[in-house]
Image (tube, grey):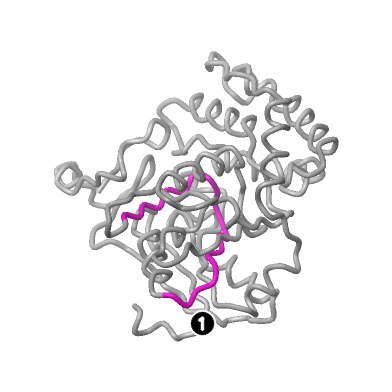
């Protein structure tokens, strides 16, 4: 892979399957070789789980931070693009773990596009309520509310909370109040949540506002001019989330993600910066097919699943088991 990567060229890393193929370790490998000034997240959100284990034994499951953060020498900064769905609570928890691994002030490594959507506890609770109500017909979900966030933004674009709103408490409070009102029936276990579904706990708006304001003060919020300048200044790695067989347009619906998991988003960002096509596309896959959770998987073998168990990719309370 390194022999085919041209110095000074941007790289796009995508998973060719259903996820869990090794995007994180691939990004870590690229960044460990030097030459990349940032990792850009161009789809997905806090539901990503990219495992990296360093030579000295430190392990971190990357979700929103780029998987180059543990690169030797210096951590590679992360940019959350407008295509990312940002969860400030999960980002803070991830930063705390990275700090325990020796990364100094992880949040200072993060820039976030103000236009990116915010995934809130209301979205997560509605996501879990809807999935629980499906019973045996679950679509497969991480229960983090990323899809719910995207769906809400499509239905109510003017009221969808964004990263930029975190610096405007009055605007964000108004949007959160409308969000809570619109999802009230789902969270109570009625309407779209399904009759008899278990009610989800109601989030605290004041606590959320305080956390989001702290988030806006700790990371650097940027506008649409930032990424083109970054791309002109240094090569970056675009780190994908999920896999192309879960893509919202090309996957096996309804067992898909509300995200474009192919190279489409990174290529769009490059085109906007006047760099159309200037990137090496790297597809990653295991030597055997895997899937985490519900949905079709050709020639699934329970015996192989046990023999090829992955200690970092375990059964998940919402996704379900790891399958081979």
Please report the bounds of the magenta region as a residue range. 34-53
Q: Based on the picture, tell me whether residue 36 belongs to the magenta stretch.
A: yes
Question: Residue 167 location in percent, x, y?
Answer: 78, 44
Question: Residue 272 location in percent, x, y?
Answer: 70, 74
For the point 30% across and 42% down, the residue is 322
For the point 24% across and 49% down, the residue is 324
Residue 302 as seen in the image, left or right of residue 145: left
Residue 47 as seen in the image, left or right of residue 230: left
Looking at the image, which is closer to me, 288 or 31?
Answer: 31
Relative to 86, is 240 above or below?
A: below
For the point 62% across and 31% down, the residue is 121
Report the number of numbered marks: 1
Q: Which residue is mark 1?
A: 9
Question: Hey, which quadrant is residue 306 in on the image?
Answer: top left
Question: Residue 235 location in percent, x, y?
Answer: 54, 77
Question: Is disc 1 placed on a helix, strand or loop?
Answer: loop
> Which quadrant is home to the N terminus?
bottom left
For the point 51% across and 48% down, the residue is 257
> Dominant secondary structure of the magenta stretch?
loop
Question: Residue 226 location in percent, x, y?
Answer: 71, 67
Residue 5 as seen in the image, left or right of residue 124: left
Q: Based on the picture, tell me whether residue 168 belongs to the magenta stretch.
A: no
């Amino acid at each position: 892979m390194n022999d085919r990567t041209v110095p000074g060229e941007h790289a796009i890393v995508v998973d060719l399957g259903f996820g869990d193929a090794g995007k994180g370790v691939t990004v870590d490998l690229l960044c460990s070789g030097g030459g990349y000034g940032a990792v850009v997240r161009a789809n997905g959100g806090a539901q990503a789980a990219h495992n990296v284990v360093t030579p000295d034994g430190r392990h971190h499951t990357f979700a929103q931070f780029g998987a180059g953060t543990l690169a030797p020498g210096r951590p590679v900064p992360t940019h959350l693009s407008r295509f990312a769905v940002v969860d400030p609570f999960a980002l803070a928890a991830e930063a705390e773990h990275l700090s325990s691994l020796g990364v100094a002030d992880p949040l200072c490594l993060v820039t976030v596009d103000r236009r990116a959507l915010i995934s809130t506890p209301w979205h997560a609770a509605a996501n879990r309520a809807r999935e629980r109500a499906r019973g045996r017909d679950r679509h497969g979900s991480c229960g983090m509310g990323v899809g719910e966030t995207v769906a809400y933004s499509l239905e109510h674009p003017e009221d969808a909370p964004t990263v930029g709103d975190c610096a405007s408490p009055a605007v964000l409070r108004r949007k959160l109040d409308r969000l809570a009102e619109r999802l009230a029936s789902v969270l109570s276990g009625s309407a779209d949540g399904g009759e008899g579904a278990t009610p989800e706990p109601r989030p605290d708006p004041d606590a959320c506002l305080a956390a989001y304001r702290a988030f806006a003060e700790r990371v650097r919020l940027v506008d649409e001019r930032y990424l083109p300048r970054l791309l002109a200044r240094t090569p970056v790695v675009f780190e994908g989330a999920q896999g192309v067989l879960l893509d919202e347009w090309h996957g096996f619906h309804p067992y898909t993600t509300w995200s474009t998991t192919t190279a489409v988003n990174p290529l769009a960002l490059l085109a906007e910066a006047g760099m159309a096509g200037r990137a090496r596309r790297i597809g990653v896959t295991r030597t055997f097919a895997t899937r985490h959770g519900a949905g079709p998987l050709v020639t699934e073998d329970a015996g192989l699943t046990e023999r090829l168990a992955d200690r970092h990719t375990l059964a998940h309370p919402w996704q379900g088991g790891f399958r081979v």
